[in-house]
Amino acid sequence: MTLPDKPGIGYARVVCDVGASGRADGAPGMTLKMERAKEIGRDNCQGRWLREEYLPGVVTVIIPTYNRAYLVTEAMDSVWAQTYRPIELIVVDDGSTDDTQQVMEKWGERCADDDQFELRYFHQENRGAPAARNLGLIESRGEFIQFLDSDDLLLPEKLATALERFREDPDLDLVYSLWEYEDADGNRKRPRAFPDLENRPRAAEVAVRNLWTAAAVYCRDLLRHAGPWNERLLCSQEWEWHVRVCCGLRSAAYVPLVLAFCRTFGPARISDIRKYDPRFIRSRLEAILCVIHTLRTADDDGLDAARDSLVHRSFMNAKEAMLADEPGLAQEAILRTFTLWKRTPRAWPVAIYLLGLSLLPETMFSLSYRFFSRVKGKDQTAKKRHASGS
């Protein structure tokens, strides 16, 4: 199938200076159809969202990037190497100050003779990865959607394998596969746990065991109903978004093959977070609250199923607030998730301890918590040595 309106050199030079309004000139608006999509959409995309119309069989691959001209082409190469066609590749430049645009122009020349492959490049002011992905979704025309970060890679059979499953079962909403993490030395390892959406297609499953975004190929209609990425979140956006996506999930297929690599090295990732930065601690808290709200309203027993995992996340967030010398934020992290803690009795001692510390004057709190952490750490080390007989 030939993609329409394709420039002769295979490169769509759509450099849209998308401002704070989030609008790209000439793109039609779209009314969100579900209440949760409308709620998120008020502060994201200015009410615009995916069109119902699409090009059958086309896979849209969306790559957000920021100052990664030296690396983004490797991700694009992995898309170009796909054995499947037709492909629409959308690269959203999140306000890069390097030569990303020039790199896009040069790279686009290679697909001049492939009428089954189109590169479209958009530039917006720096607004973060969720905003970049939202713009990519708004401009997408494919029946299926694949996300890919600018430093990650797809194996050549990734899309073909997923589309074969979609052809076998037209009722599928999502096809996902294994992935591996790769460090700077080329060492690879698989995630310790990943969701079983094939047997348990529900939101609580990804609330407990998150799904890496690039591992999946999504049916367009599933994402249209889920709503935009939450642009207010500085971190945990993928987790929060996947919970909303899986609220509308009817069926999913799992491919037990490693078909993508998540590379965990290099500077300037859009999603880089500083663990003890109060802004990110607060953002993680906001993501937890969003997930609690989504599970409570969309899944009859989803909150109960994910309760232990959410309590753990809440505790870790409060702990990081304590280590960041932010007792007020730690107290807020516990109190605002109290609906979880109050129904998990074994977590009460920890909650009471953290709340007690957070009420101390800042200096006493900091000294007390650090002393407790040091003593506990030494105690655990001694236990390990004793167990090993050393």
Image (cartoon, rainbow, N blue to C red):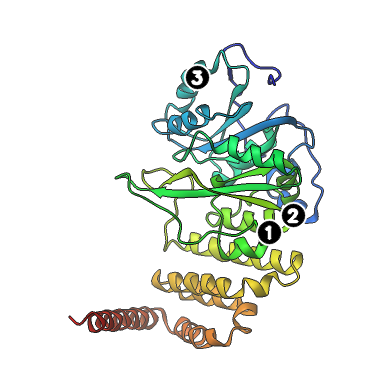
Which quarter of the rendered picture does the N terminus lie within?
top right
Q: Position of residue 166 (x, y in %)?
A: 69, 41
Q: Which residue is at 68% across, 33% downward?
A: 140
State the residue lying farthest toward the top. 8
Sequence order check, earlier mark of 3 and 1:
3
Would you identify the image quadrant in which residue 337 lies? bottom right
Q: Nearer the viewer, residue 188 or 125?
A: 188
Q: Given the image, on which type of amino acid does mark 2 rest?
A: Arg
What is the secondary structure assignment of the residue under circle 1? loop
Sequence order check, earlier mark of 2 and 1:
1
Is 331 rendered above or below residue 19? below
Which residue has dot 1 on it? Answer: 201
Which residue has dot 2 on it? Answer: 250
Q: Given the image, on which type of amino acid does mark 3 rest?
A: Glu
Q: Which residue is at 47% across, 63% downward?
A: 278
Q: Position of residue 59 (x, y in %)?
A: 64, 33
Q: Residues within 10 Å of mark 3 (few under 14, many from 20)?
A: some
**Residue 274 visible somewhere in the drawing:** yes
Q: Are marks 2 and 1 in contact (CB under 8 Å)?
A: yes
Which quarter of the rendered picture does the C terminus lie within?
bottom left
Which residue has dot 3 on it? Answer: 105
In the picture provided, is 268 more to the left or to the right than 308? Answer: left
Q: Residues within 10 Å of mark 2 (few under 14, many from 20)?
A: some
In the picture provided, is 273 more to the left or to the right than 388? Answer: right
Q: CA distance from mark 3 to mark 1?
A: 41 Å
Q: CA distance from mark 3 to mark 2?
A: 40 Å
What is the secondary structure assignment of the residue under circle 2? loop
Q: Which residue is at 56% across, 66% downward?
A: 285
Q: Given the image, on which type of amino acid does mark 1 rest?
A: Pro
Q: CA distance from mark 2 to mark 1?
A: 6 Å
**Residue 20 visible somewhere in the drawing:** no
Is 27 rendered above or below residue 213? above
